[in-house]
Every structure is written in C-alpha cells, then in structure tokens.
Image (tube, rainbow, N blue to C red):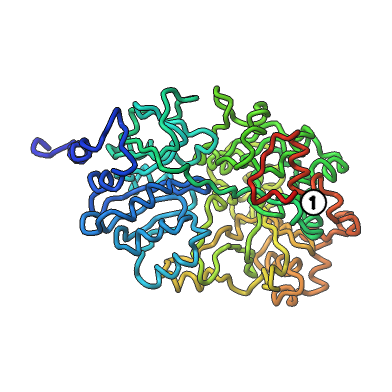
C-alpha cells in the first residue's frame, strides 16, 4: 500500500527552491540587501501561504517593502498569514496583485484601507482571529510555506538574537521550519557573537542585514498628563469594587487610559484601601511605563510580557526579579506564551472598548474599519478548559446567576472579564447602542458573523462613570439588560432605565454607584495619580526609563 506515493514532496519542493536561491548566498546564510527581491522571487511561488512578520510592535518592514517589489507575473495570488496589518506595505502587496487573501488578527493603523480593499475586491478576507487562534492555525491549516521574520542580530551561521522584542518570532519559525518551510530573517546587524541565541541557525535559511533598523511602535506608552478626572473616578471604582472585592492577584490589563489610571492609583488609592499584597501580584503585560510606580512601591511580584516597549529596556534589565530576563540581562518576551498565560493563568482581564449593545456584547469594530481584536478575546473570555482554583475565580463563579440553569448543583469558578468606557466617547458618540456597528461591518466586509470582541456571556463587569454593573450576577437576560441600562447614563439605552428597577438592582448588589461603594467623588481627580507626567515616570524609575522623543516635552 502507498508504494507509489511520494511522502516527502514538501522536502523536495523546498530543496528545489533552495537550489534556485543558492547563488545569492554570500557567506554562511547571508544574502546582500540588494539581492532580497531576487531571493523572494526564487523561494516564493504563486498561491503560497506566506507569513510576513508584522507584530503588535516590531515589523519586518524591509522584507515587506521588498515583497512589494517582486514581479507580479512570477509571484502572485499569495495567501498572507500574519498577526498585524500595520504598515502601508502590508496592503500595497494586495494592490499590486502579489497577494490575494489574508488571515490576520489586528489592523488598527490600516483598518479603514483594509475595509475599502475588501469592498473593492482587492482582498479576500479569510478570518479575523485572536492572536492565539491564528498561532494555533499555523500548526494546522495555515502553516506558512515561507516566513519573512525579523530579529535584532544574527551571526554568519544564521543564529538569531530576538532580544527585548521577541514577540511572535518563535511561534512563526517553529510552525514554518518543522513543516519543511523556508525562513528568511531581516536583522539590524550581522555580528561575530550574539548576546544569546533565541532562534538556532538550523531553523533559519537566509539572513539579510537591512539598510536601516526595523520599525517598533511604542504601543503601550500612555502619557499620564492625558488621564482625566473621569478616568481616575472609574479607576477608583474598579479598584474598590472589583480588584479589592475579589482580591485579584493575577491579571492582564488592556492598553488605554482607563487601565493606565488604575496602574497609577495602586501606590496611592490602592495603598489607602489596604490592598497591597492582596491584589495585583502577577501580570501578563507589556512593560507599561505607567507600571513603574507600582513596581517601585513593591506591589508587583512578576510580569510576563507579550512584547517590549521602547525606552523601557534599561529599567526592565535593572528589575530582573520582576521581569523574565535572559542570561544576557535582556527581557525575553513571547506573545504566544503570554497569550496562553493571559487565557489560563490570569483571574481577570480588564480593558477598554468602543461600543456595548443592550445585552452587554462589546466590540471595537466600527462600520468602515476592519480593525480586529488582537488578543482581547483570549484574555477576555471565560476559558472553559481551566481546572485550577483561586479565590477570585471561585468567588466570581459562586455569584454567576445562570450557573444553576446550566450546570445544576455543580460548582464552578469564573474568570473576571471587565470592560470600561465612558457613556459618551469623544465627539459625544454614545458607547451604548441598540445594535453594535459590528453588524454593519459584517455586511460591508462580507463576513459570516459580526466581529464581536467580548461576548456578553463572558463579560462579568461593565464600569462607566455612572457605576459598576456586575452583570454576571444576573439570573435572566432581562435582568442583565436592565443592569446594562443602569450604567449607560444619558445614552438612548440609558434613558430606557427604570428608577424602581435600578433601585432593586442596587439592593441586590448587581449595580453599584460610587456612593454605594463609599467613594467620595470630590476626591476623584488627578492629584491621586502616583505620576502625573512622563517626566515623573522617569523620576520614579531613577532615570532608567528613557521615553521615545515624541513623549518628551520637557
């Protein structure tokens, strides 16, 4: 049986591509930058699945530009599989007909253009994934045939040093290389000896020293000067009514001013509440500069990072008890492992959103922007595979109003999933709507489902300036909708709230206002922040934090 079947066709195909590329190799695995386009034409074939490393922060930008320069009569119809569509070149490759289809996770900077390309038929959209979901498919039906990755340094043999911003590189390389694929690395520098080996040379086929260092976005830096009194009030409510009430030790913060405010309230208001040592010890989190005061004040035991953050290199190196640090003294981030930690090991996810519907579903998708969600749905869901117990997980599960209807008398814990938003956003756009814009986007982008970030059955708490809705405590859908209305302020949804119903919800502890939480709203102002500017964060760090130029205004 199977005697005539070829069982190593992938290997044979790869060998043939490698032979075509061999004349371009100078020494070891090095290809000159000027030969990059020729290299791509040699190893990529029409309709290949190609991973172009575009992460949350670091970008294989030189390889992206070169991919746009290949001859579309030789390389066309590519199926791109990558985390983030961040750079113009990530979409230019579709405009030129070199690529046709994309499966991705997030496209913040290119969200509007992506929606336009989908409408015009220039891009076929596979799916919008969470990061972990996309990584999982690299090992199933979306394995890259060729991976175009990025690292800080390489040696002549092809060993790579990915350093402070390792991010997605290991998972891309592992999936590609061990399915006989080809790995091409763009590096800032080729050196004789690396600080440490992050990706071994056996897993890398070609190395190119790019003409300039790769681009990194300081995505997680929030200037404390832009935190408002409302952010402070909502942060105080979250700390007292959620963090303190559930004694959450292990958590993930989304990016934004709401969570930045909470980080800067820990050494002040958190200390006042007597919560130090009881909350916020273990984190899955990028090295947010706004975490510096909490770290310096002794709140934090450990942080595992998805990626790095520009300017935090020396600070992180000097706090090796807190961060995951390599033998060379530099941070080791890893998005796949941090997403896994965020999904299974954390008791709470808290972040901002753009819109809620009347049921409590929330999304960052708007009618004409296909942004995606990154990792929020992995962090912001109740992982059904979890079996280990913590106090906050058990407490939240014991309060779950619909537990009995679903599981009978079987006890189960529940992850805290918290979404924060003011009832009206910038330009007086309401955050609470009858129907999410995700429905319009589904129509505009020919999607099969509305792209929802956090589903209402996973969400446990909504925090607005009006108060906290503990929606997981609700016993019926009607009660949940009433709880959503109660914190929706003067939006069309909020105006449907009934005063008597609100009073009943407050009595049951399903809704809590600042007054119910014993918070004096006259104290809710910026004076409570441990640092009120980037300059003060630098001072807290003892001069170790070196913010990017755009954040320096002194």
Q: Residues within 10 Å of mark 1 (few under 14, many from 20)?
A: many
Question: Against 38, is 317 above or below?
Answer: above
Task: Identify which residue is drawn at 42% across, 37% down.
Answer: 187
Q: Is residue 11 visible?
A: no
Task: Identify which residue is drawn at 35% across, 45% down.
Answer: 140
Residue 432 pos. (x, y %): 67, 70
Left or right side of 216 for 89: left
> Which image quadrant for residue 197?
top left
Task: Identify which residue is drawn at 27% across, 32% down.
Answer: 26
46 or 483, nearer to the observer: 46
Quarter containing the N terminus: top left
Residue 510 pos. (x, y %): 76, 59
Number of callouts in the render?
1
> Which image quadrant for residue 304?
top right
> Which image quadrant for residue 500?
bottom right
Task: Identify which residue is drawn at 39% across, 37% down.
Answer: 209
Q: Which residue is mark 1?
A: 241
Left or right side of 353 for 176: left
For numbered disc 1, what is the local secondary structure? helix
Residue 155 pos. (x, y %): 39, 27
Q: Is residue 270 visible?
A: yes
333 or 355, nearer to the observer: 333
Residue 409 pos. (x, y %): 64, 47
């Amino acid at each position: 049986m199977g005697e005539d079947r070829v069982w190593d066709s992938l290997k044979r195909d790869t060998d043939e591509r490698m032979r075509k590329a061999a004349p371009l190799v100078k020494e070891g695995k090095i290809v000159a930058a000027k030969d990059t386009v020729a290299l791509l034409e040699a190893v990529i074939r029409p309709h290949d699945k190609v991973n172009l490393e575009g992460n949350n922060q670091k970008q294989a930008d030189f390889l992206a530009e070169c991919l746009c320069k290949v001859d579309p009569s030789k390389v066309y119809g590519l199926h791109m599989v990558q985390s983030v569509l961040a750079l113009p070149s990530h979409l230019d490759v579709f405009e030129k007909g070199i690529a046709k289809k994309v499966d991705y996770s997030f496209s913040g900077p290119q969200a509007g253009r992506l929606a336009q390309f989908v409408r015009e038929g220039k891009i076929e959209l596979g799916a919008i994934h969470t990061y972990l979901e996309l990584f999982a498919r690299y090992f199933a039906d979306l394995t890259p045939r060729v991976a175009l990755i990025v690292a800080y340094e390489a040696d002549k043999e092809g060993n790579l040093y990915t350093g402070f911003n390792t991010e997605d590189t290991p998972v891309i390389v592992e999936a590609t290389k061990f399915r006989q694929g080809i790995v091409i690395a763009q590096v800032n520098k080729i050196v004789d000896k690396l600080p440490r080996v992050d990706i071994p040379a056996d897993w890398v086929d070609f190395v190119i020293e790019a003409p300039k260092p790769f681009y990194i976005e300081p995505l997680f830096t929030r200037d404390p000067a832009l935190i408002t009194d409302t952010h402070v009030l909502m942060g105080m409510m979250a700390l007292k009514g959620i963090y303190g009430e559930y004694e959450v030790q292990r958590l993930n913060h989304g990016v934004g001013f709401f969570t930045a405010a909470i980080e800067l309230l820990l050494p002040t208001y958190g200390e006042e509440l007597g919560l130090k040592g009881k909350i916020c010890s273990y984190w899955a989190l990028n090295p947010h500069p706004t975490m510096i005061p909490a770290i310096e004040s002794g709140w934090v035991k450990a942080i595992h990072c998805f990626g790095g953050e520009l300017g935090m290199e020396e600070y992180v190196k000097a706090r090796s008890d807190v961060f995951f640090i390599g033998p060379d003294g530099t941070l080791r981030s890893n998005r796949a492992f941090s997403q896994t930690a965020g999904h299974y090991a954390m008791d709470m996810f808290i972040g901002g959103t753009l819109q809620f519907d009347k049921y409590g579903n929330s999304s960052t998708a708007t009618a004409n922007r296909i942004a995606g969600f990154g990792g929020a749905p992995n962090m912001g869901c109740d992982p059904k595979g979890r079996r280990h117990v913590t106090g906050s997980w058990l407490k939240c599960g014991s309060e779950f109003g619909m537990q009995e209807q679903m599981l009978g008398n079987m006890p189960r814990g529940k992850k805290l999933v918290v979404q924060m938003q003011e009832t009206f956003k910038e330009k007086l756009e309401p955050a609470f709507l009858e129907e999410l814009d995700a429905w319009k986007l589904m129509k505009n982008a020919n999607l099969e489902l509305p792209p929802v970030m956090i589903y209402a059955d996973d969400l446990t708490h909504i925090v607005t300036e009006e108060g906290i809705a503990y929606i997981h405590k609700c016993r019926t859908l009607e009660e949940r909708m009433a709880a959503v209305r109660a914190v929706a302020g003067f939006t069309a949804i909020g105006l449907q709230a009934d005063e008597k119903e609100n009073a009943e919800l407050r009595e049951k502890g399903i809704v809590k206002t600042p007054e119910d939480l014993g918070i004096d709203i006259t104290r809710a102002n910026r004076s409570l922040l441990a640092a009120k500017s980037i300059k003060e964060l630098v001072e807290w760090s003892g001069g170790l934090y070196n913010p990017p130029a755009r954040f320096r205004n002194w």
